[in-house]
Image (cartoon, helix red, strand yellow):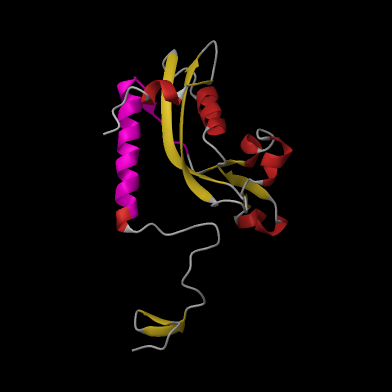
Amino acid sequence: MLPTGWSTWAGEASVVSSTKPPSGTRDFLPEEIRRREYVTRVVRDVYERYGFEPLETPAFENIETLLGKYGEEGNKLIFKILRRGEHEASGEADLALRYDLTVPLARVVAQHQNDLPRLFKRYQIQPVWRADRRRADDFVSSSSATSTRWAPLRPLSRSNCFRRYPTS
């Protein structure tokens, strides 16, 4: 039996500095995951019942894609990723974790406008990150929008979709 605060990995004993995840994050145990997956399935079913297609975007974007899209206060809440490799010494950020799902959607529509249907109805259920001390740093966001070649990014009123969905 090892003393409190010690662990083994591949037969080597080492001191564990903390067993807690980083501040603003948390672990999800099996029962919580099952509940979250159930809710996610229900939400996906509703979106797809109304003709929405799933979309996934990378967890991080080029920093210039995100900066300036959320206002000055929003820029302070973006988790920046410092440069890697030969540019590491600069201490500058060139990537950032997505703050929400709207700006990445706008990038996808701009990049793939000729590949998407004329009326693109999309939904996303993915994690987002905010450097905000008042709440968790990472959480799952659900977003839906319609985009046409003439009028991009019309948010869908979720209440219209979900009010007819049975609650039991």
Residue 116 in view, yes or no: no
Task: Please check the rendered image and state whether residue 51 is part of the magenta-colored stretch, yes or no.
Answer: yes
Tell me what residue is drawn at x 55 percent, y 27 percent: 106
Question: In this rendering, is residue 125 above or below 22?
Answer: above
Residue furthest to the top in view is: 150
Most foreground residue, 27 or 162: 162
The location of residue 66, given as percent across then percent down, is 63, 37
The residue sitting at 38% across, 57% down in the picture is: 28
Across the whole image, how many numbered discs are drawn on residues?
A: 0
> For residue 62: magenta?
no
Up/down of 168 relative to 154, above or below: below
In the image, the segment drawn in magenta is: 32-57
Quadrant in the rendering for residue 75: top right
In what quadrant of the picture does the C terminus appear? top left
Q: Is residue 131 left or right of residue 10?
A: right
Q: Between residues 80 and 35, which one lies in front from this camera angle?
A: 35
Q: Residue at x 44, y 25 (%)?
A: 158
Residue 130, compared with residue 23, is above or below; it is: above
Specify whether residue 62 is in view.
yes
> Left of 78 or right of it: where is 53?
left
> Whole-percent x and y of residue 133?
62, 54
Say which quarter of the image contains residue 61: top right
Majority secondary structure of magenta residues: helix
Which residue: 55% across, 42% down? Answer: 98
